[in-house]
Image: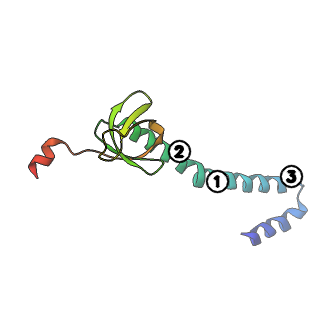
Amino acid sequence: MFDKLLALEATAEGQPAGGNWLVLIVIYGVFILAIYLLMFRPQKKQQKALKELLSQLEIGDVVLTSSGFYGTIIDIADDTVIVEFGNNKNCRIPMQKTAIVDCEKQESASQTESK
């Protein structure tokens, strides 16, 4: 690619100086597009998937928090959930929904009876 740029520069010597700016603008445009496609677009997809996950939370789901704890949802409010950790019924902690990074849906009673 560098050889092509040198060839473009060599052919542009006989042309006005404006031709070099056009090549430079195109190169910067390609770099900006590559940065967008490689960095920002996947991040937006991940944020959209997390938003969808948080909107589908239900009572009884087992969740993984951002601190690495697994717990069971026992109550859901607008932007907070109450999560019960372990077998100890006294360990119930309210937390923001944004602290949840993964969710395992509970199996319905009909699925467990058929097994």
Disc tally is: 3
Q: CA distance from mark 3 to mark 2?
A: 37 Å
What's the residue type where badge 1 is placed? Ile
- Nearest the eye: 69 or 98: 69
In this picture, is 9 found above or below 82?
below
Q: Which residue is mark 2?
A: 44
Badge 3 or badge 2: first in the primary sequence: 3
Residue 19, disc: none
In this picture, is 15 found above or below 87?
below
- Nearest the eye: 91 or 17: 91
Crowding at dot 2, Cα within 10 Å, few <14 / some 14-19 / many 20+, comes out as: few
Q: Which residue is mark 3?
A: 18
- Nearest the eye: 66 or 110: 66
Crowding at dot 3, Cα within 10 Å, few <14 / some 14-19 / many 20+, comes out as: few
Q: Residue at x 35, y 37 (%)?
A: 56
Q: Residue at x 45, y 30 (%)?
A: 79
Where residue 109 appears, x then y in whole percent? 15, 42
Q: Quadrant of residue 94?
A: top left
Badge 2 or badge 1: first in the primary sequence: 1
Between marks 3 and 2 in the image, the one whose residue lies nearer the viewer: 2
Q: CA distance from mark 2 to mark 1?
A: 13 Å
What's the residue type where badge 2 is placed? Lys
Q: Which residue is mark 1?
A: 35
SS label for mark 2:
helix
Q: Residue at x 29, y 45 (%)?
A: 105
- Nearest the eye: 113 or 11: 113
Where residue 24 appears, x then y in whole percent? 79, 55
Please give left or right for residue 93 compared with residue 112 in the image: right
